[in-house]
Image: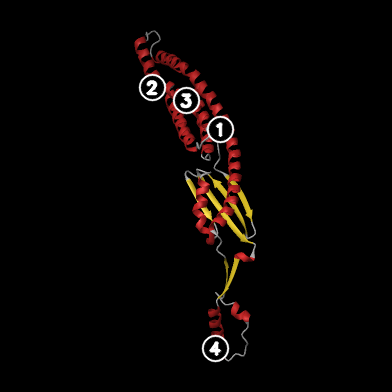
Amino acid sequence: MLKSMTGFGRGEFTNEFFKLKVEIKGVNHRYSDISVKMPRHISYLEERVKKAVKEKISRGKIDIYINIDYINESAIDIKVDIALAKSYKNTLEDLTKELEIEDSIRLFNILSMPEIVKIEKKELDEDTIWQSLNVSLGDALNDILKMKSIEGKSMKEDMLSKLKDIEVMVNEIEDRTPFVVLEYKERLRERISEILDKDVEVDENRLLYEVVLFADKSNINEEVVRLKSHISQFRSIVDEDDVVGRKLDFLIQEMNREANTIGSKANDLVISRNVVTIKSEIEKIREQVQNIE
């Protein structure tokens, strides 16, 4: 199934100790680029998070945001640095004497000093945290994959519609090709007659030689066949149950290459107009392909 690289997913998990929330945002990128933003005290789980994401998403710029809120006081540890508090108290007492200030030192004054009270999150079992995180991460992944698939389906329909228009124009070019040489032969004959005396007989062998040269230079049969083959391959690839973004990117480059060659060789106004339109449609498809996983 075709998948877009753009999407968003969210997952949450709550137990008696904490509430975990995971958000995943994906945008297009040439390779796989996963970034995880999570609280420092559980950063040891970052590689496990990346591994789980890579198993589901093969390409794109993926930003993962993980937040954990503790809802049980047993998961929070408050520490007081008694030695530092005593040192602050002694220093404040010495300061009041030195400055001859009559003031009592209150507990609030000491508690407001830096590093006296530290609020820390207790280290919970790694497997316990991971099992909980894995649930919310799984929900977020399912969410983003669903969105990527929906957008991928829409992109597929749009690209196949444009591909059908391209195929129609390629068939028109193919039907037009035999007349290009015949029309060139007539134009050449008329041009010769205009330049030379009408009573002068045209050298048919020389005329045929020039026509053969033109036919050889303007022959686009191979390019048309390859372009039609690429169109057929494109239709097959978008139905593959695999990651196909890079395949389609390469194929669309080849389609553009064949269209350019047809335009440069055909030497025909009708064909050239069709080529311009074909290239425009190919470019629109290319923009879509850039966002396919």
Marks 2 and 1, the one that precedes in the sequence: 1
| Number of the label disc, if any, that sits on residue 229 | 3
Q: Is residue 161 left or right of residue 224?
A: right
Residue 32 visible in rendering: yes
| Number of the label disc, if any, that sits on residue 159 | 1
Marks 2 and 4, the one that precedes in the sequence: 4
Q: Position of residue 261 (x, y in %)?
A: 43, 28
At label 1, counting other C-alpha atoms closer than 10 Å, the crowd grade (few under 14, some 14-19, many 20 or more) is many
Marks 3 and 1, the one that precedes in the sequence: 1
CB of mark 2 within 8 Å of CB of mark 4?
no
**Residue at mark 4:** 94
Type of the residue with mark 2: Lys
Type of the residue with mark 1: Met
Q: Is residue 259 left or right of residue 200?
A: right
Mark in front: 1 vs 4 = 4
Residue 119 vs 67, above or below: the answer is below
